[in-house]
Image (tube, rainbow, N blue to C red):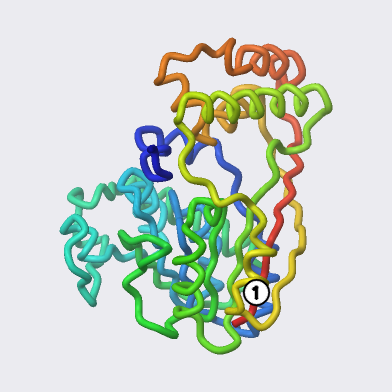
Amino acid sequence: MPDAVSRFTGFASEYDAARPRPPASVVQVIKQWSGAGAPDVVDLGAGTGLSAVIWAGQAWTVTAIEPSADMRAIAVRRLAGAGATLDRADQAGRADDAGDAADVSTAGDANGVSRAGAAAGAADAAGARAAGGADTGLQTEFVVRDATAEHTGLSSGCADVVTASQAMHWFDPDRALPEIARLLRPGGVFAAYDCDWPPCIDWETDAAYTAAAQRIAELEIARGLSPPHAGKDHLVRLRRSGLFRYATEIAVHSREQGDAERLVAVALSQGGAVALLADGASEDELGLSTLREVAARRLPRPRTWWWTYRIRLAVR
């Protein structure tokens, strides 16, 4: 059966280019809840680093946990400009945990970090600092680590904040939630957040996207290509776990600009379409041809995209 890592293997760059950037309000509300002015953060299922870099200048340390080598390579490039380090266990290819880390800037091309990549990461981090609110003057230390949400290899009580962006549905909750609770200090906050698909653009484009997404989900199941998925009833699961004192859910919003090409790329970035196309399905079968036609007609130039993020907050 496919798993979440293999689902996103081979198109990490396309994924990274299409996906939305979490808004600064995500960081602001999590920090307010945690009460930590400069939290130590662990970001589970960190992907290409989009959910880690938003903590630049807002956290003391950020440890990005990501099991996909493709995704980690981009995360390292993104975070290098923000002071990232790369866990030596990752360099060795899932060797036994090594306690210390190697500075990316000294590891050169072996880590896939180019000067251009580091410059792009610096720009990303600067944007995150500017959006994150008052300048704290913090130089956040980033570490990228090859591990999973179920077994991070980190020490107990190491985090004020643990996050999972667009990722918790891929975790085994029976194993991941106790691990998250173990990582958190007393009063620490776990935040699992996801954006709604698609962004709100206009009714016809949204309808075409939704129809394609439903068709893709049906065909994935029919062809046995759907990885295990825990669903997105995260709040119910957090409350029933008995591991947290209180849990709630809120929604925040953000805006981006996007055109027809990017909308189709977002649909592909969800993974199912790529797996089905590789399995021989056509774009017509998946509803992607219709989505392309509608998007080209309705989005001939970039328009505002309205994103909704649902954040489940739980306190240890």
Would you say 197 lies left or right of 218 here? right
Would you say 264 lies left or right of 32 here? left
Disc 1 is placed on an element classified as: strand
Quadrant of image for the N terminus: top left
Residue at the location (44% across, 56% down)?
A: 122
Three-letter amino acid code at the position of disc 1: Ala
**Closest to the observer, 192 or 123:** 192
Q: Which residue in the protein does label 1 denote?
A: 314
**Picture quadrant of residue 141:** bottom left
Question: Callout 1: 10 Å neighbours few (<14), some, many (20+)?
Answer: many
> Measured from the top left, where is residue 298 in percent x and y?
77, 18
**Closest to the observer, 149 or 52:** 149
Q: Is 71 drawn above or below residue 304 in the view shown?
A: below
Residue at the location (16% across, 58% down)?
A: 92
**Closest to the observer, 206 or 150:** 150
> Measured from the top left, where is residue 66 in percent x and y?
38, 56
Residue at the location (23% across, 52% down)?
A: 111
Residue at the location (64% across, 60% down)?
A: 234
